[in-house]
Image (cartoon, rainbow, N blue to C red):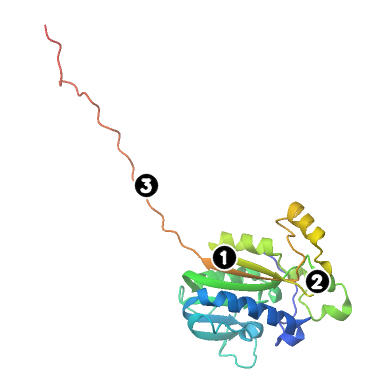
Amino acid sequence: MKSASTVAAPASWQRLLRGRHLAEQLQLRLDEWAPSLFGFTLLKVDALSAALSLERSRLLHSVLMGQSGFEGMELLGDATAMPFAPGSLDACLLAHVLDYSKHPHAILRETEVVLRDDGWLIIAGFNPYSSAGLACLFPALRHRLPPWQSMLAPGRLEDWLKLLGFEVIERDDLSLTGLFEFPLLGQWRRRYCPRFCPSLAAVYIILARKRRYPLTPIRKLSPAPRALQPGMACQRE
């Protein structure tokens, strides 16, 4: 589990580097995925998630939970100890919540608990091996991004999700700029770094689904009866 000193999560997308652009791109992806989502209750955690919409989904009700106050917040709670009964939520949206947390794995574990079986999880985050990670080196830009140590590589996040029983359904990558997305560079990354650095895109968005496969007990097989038992046949004289 990653633990690092973090800064407070921004109260709006405008406080992030190219935040308005990123919010628009993320909203387009959510609009594409939304029709496949259904259920009763959607949880949005913190202000960045609250600013995004899943109105095109078949989720009937949304709850806005904040770990600190923001406009429109309905519930104050800690994402590592959510005030919901196990299996009571149908979907959860975490837009850059893990990037600003000291305990991202604890948040994922708690999310797994409160989601019902086959519930939906949407996560957006910054890729540390990207232009966003590079921007952290510049003091003028550093305050508009989470610390580099707190960013989770998408491959690592997908590993965590699989360990918790989630199936990654979709993943998309967004760039702050196309400067680093040359075709030849992309081919080199996909060939030699398919796991750790498949893209230099600054932001990724993942759609995952909680899976529970029932265990089928294997009955203990008794040995087959012997074809001949003592006394069943005798030798004729």
Amino acid marked by disc 2 = Gly
- Mark sitting earlier along the chain (1/2): 1
For the question of whether residue 138 can be seen, the reply is: yes
Earlier residue among tags 3 and 2? 2
> Within the image, what quadrant is residue 200 found in?
bottom right
Name the one closer to the observer, 48 or 83: 48
Query: Which type of secondary structure does the marked residue at label 1 adopt?
Result: strand
Question: Which residue is pictured at 76% across the width and 76% down the height?
Answer: 146
Q: Is residue 90 left or right of residue 187?
A: left
Q: Secondary structure at mark 2?
A: helix
In the picture as drawn, the residue positioned furthest to the bottom comes out as 71
Q: Is residue 110 above or below residue 61?
A: above
Q: Position of residue 157 (x, y in %)?
A: 65, 64
Of the residues tagged 3 and 1, which is closer to the observer? Answer: 1
Q: Which residue is mark 1?
A: 169
Give the mark toward the camera: 3 or 2.
2
Q: Which residue is mark 3?
A: 218
Name the residue nearer the viewer: 67 or 39. Answer: 39
- What's the residue type where badge 1 is placed? Ile
Q: Nearer the viewer, residue 27 or 219?
A: 27
- Residue identifier under label 2: 178
Where is residue 134? Give x, y as percent: 84, 70
Q: Amino acid at mark 3?
A: Ile
Residue situated furthest left in the rendering = 237
Q: Residue at x 25, y 27 (%)?
A: 226
Q: Residue visible at 66% across and 78% down?
A: 26
Quadrant, the C terminus:
top left
**Distance from label 1 to label 2 (Cα)?**
25 Å
Q: Position of residue 89 (x, y in %)?
A: 48, 77
Give neighbour class at mark 2: few <14, some 14-19, many 20+ (Cα, 10 Å). Answer: few
